[in-house]
Structure formats: C-alpha cells, structure tokens
Amino acid sequence: MLDIKFIRENKDLFAKGAEKKHIKFNVLDLISVDDERRNLLSSVETSRAEQNIFADKIGKESDSNNRGALIEQSKKAKQDLKEKEEKLAEVMKKWQGLMLQVPNIPDMSVPEGDSDAQNVEVRSWGEKPKFNFKPKDQIALFEALNMADFERGTKVAGFRGYFLKNDAVLLCFALWQFTLDKFIKKGFTPMIVPSLVNREPFMGTGYLPQSEEDLYKTQDANYLAGTAEVATMGYYMNEVLQKSDLPKKIIAFSPCFRREAGSHGKDTKGLVRVHEFFKVEQVVLCEASHEESVKFHEELTGISEEIMRDLKIPHHVVANCGGDLGLGQVKKYDIEAWVPSEEKYRETHSSSYFHDFQTRRLNIRYKDDQGKLRFAHSLNNTALATPRILVPLVENYQNEDGSITVPEVLRRYVGKDVIKL
C-alpha cells in the first residue's frame, strides 16, 4: 500500500489518478477514516498511559481505602481502554481495506482512455508479410503439422485445454533457451520460481483483492499464480537490501494459471488465451528514484523488443491508456505482434513500473548512502509467454506448401530449418 502521509498531502493527485484510471475510489472517504484512526490511536495511547499511572499509584499506595478507590478507577479506565481498542480494531480493518484500494498515480505521459482501444502506438518494427496464397490461421497450421491437439485437450482439461506435440514442443524449448541465454548475457539472475504461492505475495503485488476472480485457489488457501512476477517479488519480502545490491535483475521462469474469468467469449479456440501456460518474466528492483524506474522501464521494454526483432516477427509497442492500467502501475507498455489471419496486432508482452507500490506492501527496503531505510522501486516485463508467442510465429513464418520456416535464431535449438510433415 502507498504512504498515507503522501496520500493526505496529495489527495487531489490521487483523485485525478483514480479518475484517469477509471477506478472508483473516493480519496476523501479514506482521509475521513484515517482521521478517525488517528484520533482513536491518540486516545488509546492516552488511556494506556493512564493505566500505567494507575498501576504505579496502586503499587505505592499504602492506605487500603485509597488503594481500593484507585483499583476501582483503574477497572473503569481499563474497560474504557478495551472499548477504545475494539473500536480501533474495527476502524483499522476498514482503513486497511481502503488503503488496499488506493490506485497508484499514473505518469503524466500515460494517454487518456477507458480501454485498450485507446492505447497509443509508440513505434513499430518489421514489414507485415505479403503472401501469394491465402494464409492459414494458427489452428489449421498446428493441426495440419501435428503440432497440437485441441480436441483431446478439451477432453482431458476442459475448456481452453490443449496438447502441444512434436515440433511445437521443440519450438517452446528453443524459445525458452534462446530467451534465457540472452538474459544471462545481460547480467540477469535466472530463477525457476513457485507457481503455488500463499496470499501475502499476491496482496503485495496487487493481484489481491482486486483480481481474485481470475485466480485459481487451492484447498489450502494458496493460489496458483498467473505470472512469475508474484513469487519473484515475494523472494525479498520483509528484507533489507544494501544500496550496493541494487539493481536486482531477475529472469524468472514458471508455469502460470489464469481462470480468464472476465474473458467469456474471447479467443475461445487456439493458443492465444489459455488457462495454463509458461512465462519467462523480467523483474527488477532498483533505487527509489523516478528517473531510475523510467530508465529500467525503457531498458526492459527494449530487451523484449530485441527478442521480437531477433525472431523477425512484425510488431509494435503501445503506451497503455489510463483505463488499461492496473491498480499499482505507474506506466505500462504492451508489445503486440502481427497475426496475419486476423489482420491485426495481438499482445505478446507487457512492461510495467510501480514505484514503491509493491515494495511497501511487501516491505522490501534498502539502506541508502546515509543509512536511511527506503522502499525500493519495482518493475516487471514479459520476456516470453508460451504458447501464445507460437501464434504469430507460425502464422508469419508459414509457407505456401503448408510448412513453417523456423526462425534463424532458433534453428540451432530446434535442429531443423523447416517444420513439415
């Protein structure tokens, strides 16, 4: 959660930020509850001090009558304190609930808009392929080359279930290894992180309570994460780092799970939107500086663009509008790849920075040069999401005879230049 002092001092900014993000949140309601919390805290502290005074007086009083009177007064004061503490507990619960709903202030450069339809193109790369034949869509390509089985996937796993087979599997492993090699060369620490994660990291990263409907929950009250970001951010939870340790640059791999609860009727076939998938995720912790956050945001986005250029997949980068930002994001870019069968760009990567929104919740701090404790800033960015990336890959690289040319950078991993029957 954010700093209540900063919220109180900048309530107009937070009101405008919520409006820009199209999030229903009344900052004045929070300040009103915070006033009540502060008053109760002061009253409780005063009553506790009075209890200490009574205890001291009772201990020193030798006259039995005076001692009895003091004890009676102490009992009444203790009951009064108990009632105040109970009231404070209620108010604190309400206050904490509201604090978890405070949206982070979006950057001034974030475009106006209420949905992804208002996202703004920043730059584009690559020429869209021109076929001298009618291009097939992903499903036709995967099934014709025996690379996926959607019918049996549904039979075994239900709606949005799938099996990947043969060369699709080789492509996935090739993509993972290619991506991992690139990030290790750039100084990132590789990790395989848990998908089964307890509630605290989800609260810390902002996925709870807002996005609970999109998460799978276990009988042990844990959750299955939809991104490696959650576990990776939890890695340094409740720890104090040294400034010299920063930046922490991690490339994390994990299976991912999403219910896609809000996507009824969208992408019901194929591999664009599935319940179970794999992600390679970039996560960075840096100094508490807006300039540092902006620098790393551009750097992380640039590495993902580099991957797309290496794969030679036409794509563009869009700046997400206010209504397409999450609760904690200050700014976000999406990279969208060209999908020939749909004649439009589809999202393959997202890149976000949060300032200290997540690290305050997770209590991730560092000591600056003066020895002062400060909350780090956090960023994350998709490095690669499979099997989704296979969709633009196979569609852009398809040939008239039904084969698929393997991107040059993947050939040494796949072991072939062309996928065909």
Image (cartoon, helix red, strand yellow):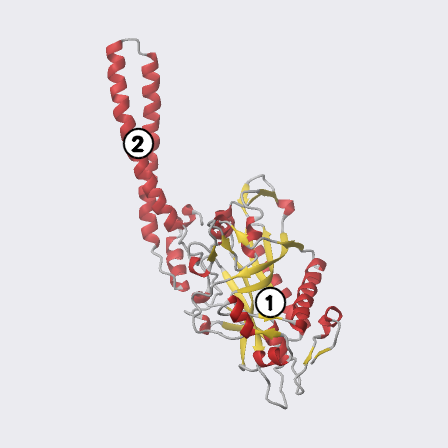
Q: Which residue is mark 2?
A: 82
Task: Tell whether 122 sits left or right of 179.
Answer: left
Give whichever of 92, 114 is nearer the camera.
92
Name the residue type under label 2: Lys
Is label 2 in a helix, a strand or a loop?
helix
Give whichever of 378, 275 is nearer the camera.
275
Residue at horizontal 56%, vertical 82%?
341
Q: Which residue is mark 1?
A: 386
Query: 240 above or below 415?
Result: above
Name the quadrant of the C terminus: bottom right
Task: Tell whether 129 sits left or right of 56.
Answer: right
User: What's the distance in space between the residues labelled 1 and 2, CA to CA?
Assistant: 55 Å
Q: Which residue extends farthest bottom? A: 132
Is label 1 in a helix, a strand or a loop?
strand
Residue at horizontal 41%, vertical 51%?
100
Q: Is residue 271 visible?
A: no
Name the residue type under label 1: Thr
Q: Quadrant of residue 44?
A: top left
Query: 359 above or below 137?
Result: above
Residue at horizontal 63%, vertical 51%?
248
Mark 1 packing: few (<14 Cα in 10 Å), some, or many (20+)?
many
Mark 2 packing: few (<14 Cα in 10 Å), some, or many (20+)?
some
Residue 257 position within the rendered picture, expressed as x and y whole percent measured from the top left? 52, 61
Task: Tell whether 177 sits left or right of 231.
Answer: right
Residue 201 position within the rendered picture, expressed as x and y whole percent measured from the top left? 51, 50
Tell me which label, 1 or 2, sits earlier in the chain.
Answer: 2
Residue 263 position within the rendered picture, expressed as x and y whole percent measured from the top left? 44, 69
Residue 353 position within the rendered picture, expressed as x and y whole percent measured from the top left? 53, 58
Tag shown at residue 15: none
The reply to whether dot 1 and dot 2 touch (C-beta < 8 Å) is no
Mark 1 or 2, closer to the camera: 1
